[in-house]
Amino acid sequence: MIEHRLDWERAERTGASEAVLCDPKSAAQIDAIVAHASELGRRLLFTRLGERKFARLGAPARDALDYDASSRTAILGGVPAPLGPGRIAIVSGGTSDAPVAREAARTLAFEGESATLIVDVGVAGLWRLMERLEEIRRHRVVIAVAGMEGALFSVLAGLVPCPVLAVPTSVGYGVGAGGRTALRAALASCASGLAVVNIDNGFGAAHAALRILGDRAQG
Amino acid sequence: MIEHRLDWERAERTGASEAVLCDPKSAAQIDAIVAHASELGRRLLFTRLGERKFARLGAPARDALDYDASSRTAILGGVPAPLGPGRIAIVSGGTSDAPVAREAARTLAFEGESATLIVDVGVAGLWRLMERLEEIRRHRVVIAVAGMEGALFSVLAGLVPCPVLAVPTSVGYGVGAGGRTALRAALASCASGLAVVNIDNGFGAAHAALRILGDRAQG
Amino acid sequence: MIEHRLDWERAERTGASEAVLCDPKSAAQIDAIVAHASELGRRLLFTRLGERKFARLGAPARDALDYDASSRTAILGGVPAPLGPGRIAIVSGGTSDAPVAREAARTLAFEGESATLIVDVGVAGLWRLMERLEEIRRHRVVIAVAGMEGALFSVLAGLVPCPVLAVPTSVGYGVGAGGRTALRAALASCASGLAVVNIDNGFGAAHAALRILGDRAQG
Amino acid sequence: MIEHRLDWERAERTGASEAVLCDPKSAAQIDAIVAHASELGRRLLFTRLGERKFARLGAPARDALDYDASSRTAILGGVPAPLGPGRIAIVSGGTSDAPVAREAARTLAFEGESATLIVDVGVAGLWRLMERLEEIRRHRVVIAVAGMEGALFSVLAGLVPCPVLAVPTSVGYGVGAGGRTALRAALASCASGLAVVNIDNGFGAAHAALRILGDRAQG
Amino acid sequence: MIEHRLDWERAERTGASEAVLCDPKSAAQIDAIVAHASELGRRLLFTRLGERKFARLGAPARDALDYDASSRTAILGGVPAPLGPGRIAIVSGGTSDAPVAREAARTLAFEGESATLIVDVGVAGLWRLMERLEEIRRHRVVIAVAGMEGALFSVLAGLVPCPVLAVPTSVGYGVGAGGRTALRAALASCASGLAVVNIDNGFGAAHAALRILGDRAQG
Amino acid sequence: MIEHRLDWERAERTGASEAVLCDPKSAAQIDAIVAHASELGRRLLFTRLGERKFARLGAPARDALDYDASSRTAILGGVPAPLGPGRIAIVSGGTSDAPVAREAARTLAFEGESATLIVDVGVAGLWRLMERLEEIRRHRVVIAVAGMEGALFSVLAGLVPCPVLAVPTSVGYGVGAGGRTALRAALASCASGLAVVNIDNGFGAAHAALRILGDRAQG
Amino acid sequence: MIEHRLDWERAERTGASEAVLCDPKSAAQIDAIVAHASELGRRLLFTRLGERKFARLGAPARDALDYDASSRTAILGGVPAPLGPGRIAIVSGGTSDAPVAREAARTLAFEGESATLIVDVGVAGLWRLMERLEEIRRHRVVIAVAGMEGALFSVLAGLVPCPVLAVPTSVGYGVGAGGRTALRAALASCASGLAVVNIDNGFGAAHAALRILGDRAQG
Amino acid sequence: MIEHRLDWERAERTGASEAVLCDPKSAAQIDAIVAHASELGRRLLFTRLGERKFARLGAPARDALDYDASSRTAILGGVPAPLGPGRIAIVSGGTSDAPVAREAARTLAFEGESATLIVDVGVAGLWRLMERLEEIRRHRVVIAVAGMEGALFSVLAGLVPCPVLAVPTSVGYGVGAGGRTALRAALASCASGLAVVNIDNGFGAAHAALRILGDRAQG
């Protein structure tokens, strides 16, 4: 009785493509959305689609979707070839932060924007970050992805002049569990000009980066 | 014995001017910083300098500073004439959010960037926001300033395609006291691509906006 | 040894029908309650009865109950035909809020009150809400259901003059997880006259709405 | 440069009169608002106006306002004679909750609605509440005001069939400090159909009650 | 390599029998404890022993233990016949609080103390509590067990003169989840002389009651 | 218009004398209460009456009251001679906990019960506690008063067989500020049978102790 | 695409061996790390490797690793014979704290440092701790491991002059759940000179102890 | 009646000198402690003694004390000449952290231990820290003092092999206010072997450092 009405109109007004957050949706609901969008010939990005739920989708949906398990994303309608070299660097602190970093990368790919992934450069081994610094500074926007104590955000923002978007991740235990410590560290940073998105929100950071690049038509 | 070493070098590396957070400093410490910077011929921005503390500064410091009580900021070395029309809109929800909105405006003015202040357009009276929407959309970056429940952030980000920087303010009482509710509302927003700074951090939002405009030389 | 004593007397004193919260009860306990109430010829509403637990009920209970999986409610003793057009609008922000919205609707239906469900009108796409505004305003009470940052509550309460009951939902992640952010946003709202119930409490909002309609005899 | 724009238009759309929260405003700002509204011949309610701040207002404002110290409210433009007997009961648990109870009463008085104040009927002395129960039940809406553990809310809502609006107060110490415990108790109540407003928000409860009485024209 | 050393000596010094909290222990560890205590001819109480874990115990342990699933307790060495009529009343608010109420009862039974269980007398239906009041007042100690908003604690402590021990339970959802709201309500109660134990700690309340009855020899 | 109605009836029903919490009351309100009770010839205990507020009371009130600054209590109607040797030991961890320990002692004195004060026996110097242990064990009830990490509660409850009432105090800084850490430590104690009251609530602990001694007539 | 780059260089700079936190890693990722390190002839410590995940590793990894289920650790490359008697005492409060105590012991063993494990000496039975005190005092560093209310930390630090490292554990329920209470108790301790690590962080405490012993070459 | 009993015995057992926390004590209490200790010829350290309270002390106390306003400490009995070069480095992130850094330094000085103060080396300007790194690494213990997001702790611990004691400070605003964010960042650090003390606890860090240096006789 209640159906998901995809907000095609919003896409037109704000320039943002529609995305479907799969976490709170059943496989049947996702099947229906894929079918409906396919019928209309619309492209769609699906986020937080775990491997188990993907496996429970019907064959038509599974066939239609370009699925990436590590980022838990699926793309309907094809991934466009990127338009030139990456303007966005995605820098992450540890292996465990990779799923969130990759969610950001896939969201950008869906929008035709390529990104440079620079992983495992946490501050406990500062020289690794320093070795990649010149490469990072060549980008127009930096998306920083880190959990635990989130020290990476302040260190990075103190080293590069471009916009730095902090994505705290829920990686950690004890007082670091759930990402609250990394989130607060990003917000309380002593480095000025850092901007922050919700915990594990690689999708949101990608959209903030796209707003900054500013290529989308203004309503 | 312990003195504040102004980090002139950082300004050169990241393109950011130095600023002095006055809240935890004594009048004597601020007097000394003003004297030292004046001697070196350096410009400086002072934030969170309340009227009482300003009144306790020595005459030389008070004379040297361009002080604005409503934003609690002071500028040493003069405010440059803005370089063209404002590229940044600062939109605030209520009268009580004005000091934070003005801190952002003064920080931008210190850097030679003018901003358009659009105040009292909270969502409880949505038509007021709607009347100013076209004007807001003409800017390259929007700084949204709101306390209480922070609904303004989501509404704005759903209506404009450019980068929106949310500054939650500590205006509110009960569960809204201290700005935590507005902060969480900004982070949990259903509108994608919103980026957030710390509570009452108009200074930080201004610097994030400057990073986005990207005119500063890259170290 | 300890049995659930249904409080038939309370129903007579406050005009409220008895309801059974199934979450913390075993299938055996629910079977017993159904049998006992059937024997007495009493009608009953069961809430938070998940599909798995419903499937574990005995055949007599399953046969006796009118079960609705999407709202996780069951009704014993039949659903009365509604007494005229809906006086209550249930407005929800996203697809994921639907179970809570439907719990409210089923609770009202059990009491013989029909409701108008208006879904997927979240503030990220404000025009969808605006298109339904005149329809919403034709009701005597509005139940607003939203998770994440809960901006819908303030926007709605600023647009309609009738009582607005906010039901925050546990939909969200990061700082939005568990519904606390939506709850606080409802309580801290800048729109005056908003009243709030517990997170995911569609049942409670329905009862508050029934108290407002005030048709029930006063003890 | 930034002025408070009174939202006369909102009053017309939602039927709510404009109110001014004085807590975060300076005496000078309040003086200006009084002068401006007087010029336009508008009535206004001022809330959270402490005695010290009232004493710092200019003589014209002090003369124009009907000030009540116990509720920290002031009314510009006169208090209308109430339209008939009180339809709203304001029930409070202890002496210390009186300021919030009176804020609700004054807000109603400003709107021409009289209320019955029933104080000092906390649950630690249940018989006092019981003695007043029949009187309370004769009203169409009950505003319940309580701090500390907020047990009054559940007890009352279990005893009366009409709408009960809970206003938690910040009265208490230790874990009861600031009103969070009373607020959570109201939201988690085992009595169904209780609706809740923010801590110390007598003004908001009064507006919710007015929405329920429903006499105001619908936009 | 690390074994659980039962603290027989403590029993002698404080008069308390030893108890084993099973939650964080494996079935193998519990088997070993049962075997060791049986060998020594010691009696033991096991708490928080869920049905699944009990089923995984070895046959000797299962045979040796008097197991009660509803309270998740097991007794080794037999339950003594109670020494006279119950001096302790255990009063609980709802069916869902029964497991905690029964943990208290079983702990008392293990110590040879019988208790009167009075259940389902929550404050939403105050007359049920009132009907049992005289019976409750005939006891020397009252253990009150309640979840959600915990209003029962204040109401009871205002009605009886004997010691009242509040046991908040983790029954509830939204802001009531996990028992924090009931706990804070017990601590912030307006009724004087209420004493409180940890959430779901029926065992602790029973021991506090035993300390109050004071029959145990003083070391 | 709103007056404090002293609940003389409650005193008769529960055996508890009335007490007046002065924190949220004005000097004028306290003057009026003293006058009214004096007229009726009633005894009264005043708690949380700071030195400044006491100094602002009228001469009649100041003359009528037996004031003790260190416990911030005042007694109207005289302090009765204690009925025999102290049955209650009040044990505190540090000098800074003394005001709370003394509030308990004065509350007991008001009820005619003497108490033994044993101070400065915190666990950082365990031998001091050990030296007083035999003396402590000679009492029927122990009130333990401690702030910071509250380790005293567990240590004491493991060493004495009688009822131990824990009063956490707000003494501490950093994570110990406000008494939350000491409160949680008391509730989570590994020593069984500890009962807890609100932070700084010496008055409540005294009343719980009186309930345990059980001399008061049962209503 | 994203691989775990083991930071061999850090080991050389800070003297710390590399460790792999297995919680957020898949069995496949761990297999790869084992293979890669084996190839390079590197030793490695794996922490938080549960029995289930260990069972899902490939045969080569399972064969190569020295696995200890109780501490959830695995060692690649052999455990060196300890260099002399234990200089570090690991003291724990209860059986349930043993896994964390053993994680510390295994981390030390991996580094060639033996430790003395002293378990089940919680403060509820103080004499057990006292009996072992002389033994504990013979070590150069004490690692104290405790959950629930963490009183052990203060008691120990008041009794020994050497460095005491507190490791709060997540053992507990109600307000003690998750280890926050034990953590705060350690930080707020009245005993001076206590140093604290994250909840359940036996690994971190071991490394802090190694830093204190100071044998490792300085980079 | 209640007096502060200085624990001279503890000093002898644990090797720690006695210190007096002045925050919760009155000027009169401090005067008495100074007089008593002077009489006994004992040395004493006073912490958290603000300038206002110091000014209110009697002349004998003021004359007897060596007072340092910036660290809010006073020393009775003289400051010994340090025994050789500093073995402890105190490294702080910003000017505002200096009072806490100096409290540590003064505590060490009282014990005859000199320290090297290295201030204003926060991570937002990483090169400043790098320039001092060799100097820092020449010490046996590092006390790191930082507020806001506390990134300094992780960066330092990743760069030096010796023990690092993190002292979070209450410097910050918004989510950084009160030091909780810096504290959690220290505990959740990705750098292994970091040990943490309470917020603003320079005194405690100094004592932990002294325990590590280990020169004090073992009781």
Image: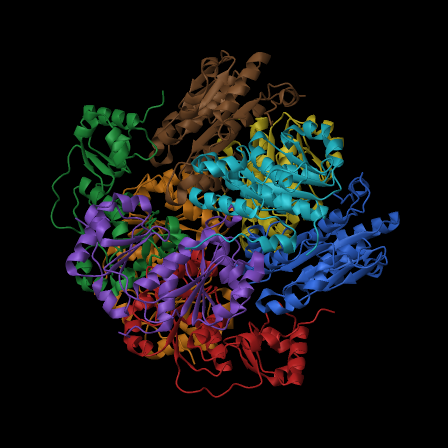
Chain colours: A purple, B red, C green, D orange, E brown, F yellow, G cyan, H blue
Nearer to the camera, F204 or G194: G194
Residue F188 in percent (x, y) is at 55, 36
- Of residue C172 and residue E109, the one placed in the foreground of this image is C172
Q: In this view, does F72 lie above or below F157?
A: below
Residue sitting nearer the eye, G115 or C12: G115
User: Quick one: H33 or G201, which is closer to the camera?
Assistant: G201
Residue F150: percent from left, percent from top:
62, 40
Position of residue H158 measured from the top left corner of the image (x, y, whole percent): 61, 56
Q: In this view, does D201 lie to the left or right of F62?
A: left
Q: In this view, does E26 lie to the left or right of A102?
A: right
The answer to whether residue A135 shows anywhere in this view is yes
Tell me which residue sits at (65%, 47%) in the image. G208
Residue G107 on image: x %, y %: 61, 41
Q: Could you tell me if residue B150 is visible in this image?
A: no
Q: In which quarter of the image is residue E178?
A: top left
Residue F48's place in the image compared with D8, above or below, is above
